[in-house]
Amino acid sequence: MASEEASLRALESLMTEFFHDCTTNERKREIEELLDNFAQQIGAWRLCLYFLSSTRNDYVMMYSLTVFENLINKMWLGVPSQDKMEIRSCLPKLLLAHHKTLPYFIRNKLCKVIVDIGRQDWPMFYHDFFTNILQLIQSPVTTPLGLIMLKTTSEELACPREDLSVARKEELRKLLLDQVQTVLGLLTGILETVWDKHSVTAATPPPSPTSGESGDLLSNLLQSPSSAKLLNQPIPILDAESEYMCSLALECLAHLFSWIPLSASITPSLLTTIFHFARFGCDIRARKMASVNGSSQNCVLGQERGRLGVLAMSCINELMSKNCVPMEFEEYLLRMFQQTFYLLQKITKDNNAHTVKSRLEELDESYVEKFTDFLRLFVSVHLRRIESYSQFPVVEFLTLLFKYTFHQPTHEGYFSCLDIWTLFLDYLTSKIKSRLGDKEAVLNRYEDALVLLLTEVLNRIQFRYNQAQLEELDDETLDDDQQTEWQRYLRQSLEVVAKVMELLPTHAFSTLVTHHREGNEEPDSLPAHVARVFPVLQDNLEVYLGLQQFIVTSGSGHRLNITAENDCRRLHCSLRDLSSLLQAVGRLAEYFIGDVFAARFSDALTVVERLVKVTLYGSQIKLYNIETAVPSVLKPDLIDVHAQSLAALQAYSHWLAQYCSEAHRQNTQQFVTLVSTTMDAVTPLISTKVQDKLLLSACHLLVSLATTVRPVFLISIPAVQKVFNRITDASAQRLVDKAQVLVCRALSNILLLPWPNLPENEQQWPVRSINHASLVSALSRDYRDLKPNAAAPQRKMPLEDTKVIIHQTLSVLEDIVDSVSGESTKSRQICYQSLQESVQVSLALFPAFIHQSDVTDEMLSFFLTLFRGLRVQMGVPFTEQIIQTFLNMFTREQLAESILHEGSTGCRVVEKFLKILQVVVQEPGQVFKPFLPSIISLCMEQVYPIIAERPSPDVKAELFELLFRTLHHNWRYFFKSTVLASVQRGIAEEQMENEPQFSAIMQAFGQSFLQPDIHLFKQNLFYLETLNTKQKLYHKKIFRTTMLFQFVNVLLQVLVHKSHDLLQEEIGIAIYNMASVDFDGFFAAFLPEFLTSCDGVDANQKNVLGRNFKMDRDLPSFTQNVHRLVNDLRYYRLCNDSLPPGTVKL
């Protein structure tokens, strides 16, 4: 006894020292080692049992329980049965004796240890494990403890970790399912008893404004008056103990619902009881009146009254998230929805004391989140099921959802509700598409709700209606999607607007058009509720267009003569709203094109004319350069409105293109005027004096006119001529890179792209070709001067200056090539003729810059774009010359220097080179086939050895893609198949050529599966599977006889080691596809051999593993067998590792 006492004191002092601030890390490691060694001793648990019953030191208790946990989960097989019996008897006694005094985390850990024993031994050796839990729950004194044990059992046994065999996992789940009905009955009883006990005192509520809450909507929602009456009972005030017990019961239910199937075990009385508790979350009175008396624990519980509501909603959401609903459960679901919408009505009810928003603000934030989750699940999973029930009032539900959405106290809450509306709108759209006959009926049913939604969402993005909230939004910090909080808010809102527009176009457009017309004439047929939607755009436009009268000339330029603080603030809000509404107008452009072009032509024309007018106005009076009273606010506002008006106009470029083809037939002056005026608005902005935001918007609009609209007369417009002259003038100051590239793309496309609706002989190619050549010549003048030649050796220019010229020219030329790569042959021919000299200069310069990886990177980018877009135009001899130059330049030493020493730029250079080769090996026909041997040799003998052992993923993905493309597009380079041979043999047993290269490539694929990079693993597995689908790779003799089972072995080992667990399913399917080539060989030879080679398992266990692998040949059963084999193999190894040395296994 004395020695036990001494050990305890020593352990306490060690623990105290370990957690002391002054203890060094070195000393902590020593203590850790000492404690680990103690835990490994056989019989250490006896001392730990003594420690648990004799100490009050939390650290010592936690350590002792960890020793038990380790013993049960890792060494249990080797523990003598007498010891096991003693442990099974002592630990529950200890728990019963001390559960009231133990700190909660120690008590929970002790429960977990006892459940771990049940996981191993119940029911065979620990037959009263579950009975004991049920008894604890039924005895009032120990109910909370029983509930903690029950929840821990559900967590640990229903979804156990992998340290059990599959058979044991299945057995445990079955045993638990047998107990579900009893357990749910007990939990229902506990919750009902507490509710009834505390409801007695509040049976006759005094009349109050809230007691008559069952209005018409309620009687609609709830079939029977009795259930409405039941839900209207005042919420009882619970004492702390009852509240704690209910929270434990609800936690148990939430976990049980996560895995038990929906069935009759979940009774109506249980559901009703859960809803009673869900009311705790939305009843503010009960929370305020909560009697808080006595200890500090009671105080905490009093504050957490809303937590019962949160837990009850968690239970409801667990049930809601199940998509598979048995027929007999549908009625329960309907009842659940009715009861939840009763709560929703309660939350969103207006009365004198509370606005809806203040009510939502007072609710627990988690409760509101759970409620929103419920609504999302209802709309996404169950709406289609419930909508058909005549007794379920969907429109009234939408009314409540509307109130709930637009009174959310936080931005995140509002975003989440907008998501729910998006789901609803998607549901309606797909419903209409699948059943066209009902379109009118569906729209008539929901029209009012949708129009209300449209109006309110539009109001929410305007400072005019929602300034306080909008000013809280951050418009500077970018999130993971590269947008600010304000941009996200606007984008999500406009998506909802667009979806409503898609469903109700006529409403929306008549509204739009009404408020775009010059006068105030409104069409008589316009519904009143629609006319409220867009008038504000007109108001803001009038403010903007009226600014001209406030511009005065000052010494340094023009100034906006609006200085009063209030006026500046109102102008700021108006400009922000105009900017948002212009984005809305742009977002709706897609609803004017295609089949509805003619029907909505006049609407769209009015919109486009107004946009053209606004952009021209901004450019003419140069609002972007005007001085203002509050430059930090108003100047960005003015620039943004101007930029957004250009962007909105750009959104209508597809409409303009459709108009262009119609105008071509009618030759209308109206179209010419629209395009000319747009160019008048754009041209002044293409200048270095204009802010980037505005400059880029103008450039993008110019590109759309040149590329999408393509009017014949564009080149002859004076404004366009002006841009040509500016860009080709060597003395003019260059625009910022991005803008320069866009403008050059637009000018090139004006000359290169075929005009729509004109025959080939009217395309004026000769003159356009000459103009394009002179454009490119001007753009590449300095670059071509860099070419060294015999007469004039290269001029000495500082390296950095040379690099700038190369960068500026190649970025423009690459973009020009890229933009015609998908166009007609004629466009690409002209493009290549213009670029030919620059391409030759690039090839001549390439060797000189091979050691400058940043320059090589840009040059290879250019060549890659050329190969993708213009390889036919470049012709075979020149293409061969380029490839040969590259192959000669990228020696083993050069590759090693790029990959190993030049960091990410060097790797990018090699990746671009491999991408060029990918284009080459994919080329059909025989032209580039002579390069295959040297390409494969470059890959396997030069690149692969450098990167094979490097952990970094750089270059690998590109290399394996090149190898895959080489195989996929050049299969006959390896497998010569003749029609005659396949007819004679019945199956094609091709002759094999270039076998060493094929084997080396396959070996590289195999090696890649042994490396940790999961992306590479997934990519390469996909490549092998594709080769099998397209070319029957796994069936080829060489693969079948020498590689098949090596691959299966590697993939199985990967599953056993859990190194790529995210790809379990893909790996299982690949193993099946490989095994199915030779099932007999797999079952008779491979599987026994694989098991024989497995270490860490004995012969008997290997036999069991082999027997359990059924000879199923269908995919689902086979992959299930694979995962069972992997799980059980890991389990046996774990068991064997836990046995004490020298154990005799029978």
Image: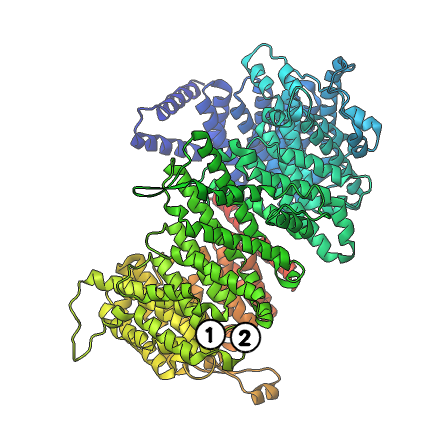
The kind of residue tagged 1 is Leu
Disc on res. 967: 1
Q: Secondary structure at mark 2?
A: helix
Query: What's the residue at 53%, 67% (across, down)?
Result: 1025
Residue 933 seen in render: yes
Give how far across and how far down residue 603 sits, in percent.
63, 55
Left or right? Give the position of 1056 relative to 592: left
Label 2 crowd (10 A; few <14 / some 14-19 / many >=20)? some
In the rendered view of the protein, which quadrant contains the N terminus?
Answer: top left
Q: Quadrant of residue 129?
A: top right
Query: What's the residue at 46%, 33% (across, down)?
Result: 567
Disc on res. 1031: 2
Label 1 crowd (10 A; few <14 / some 14-19 / many >=20)? some
Query: What's the residue at 51%, 55% (across, down)?
Result: 612
The kind of residue tagged 2 is Gln
Disc on res. 84: none
Give how far across and how far down residue 938 sits, in percent.
34, 73
State if disc 1 and disc 2 touch (CB < 8 Å): yes
Left or right? Give the position of 108 relative to 622: right
Give how far across and how far down residue 1058 sits, in percent.
49, 51
Left or right? Give the position of 659 relative to 721: right
Q: Earlier in the sequence, mark 2 or mark 1?
A: 1
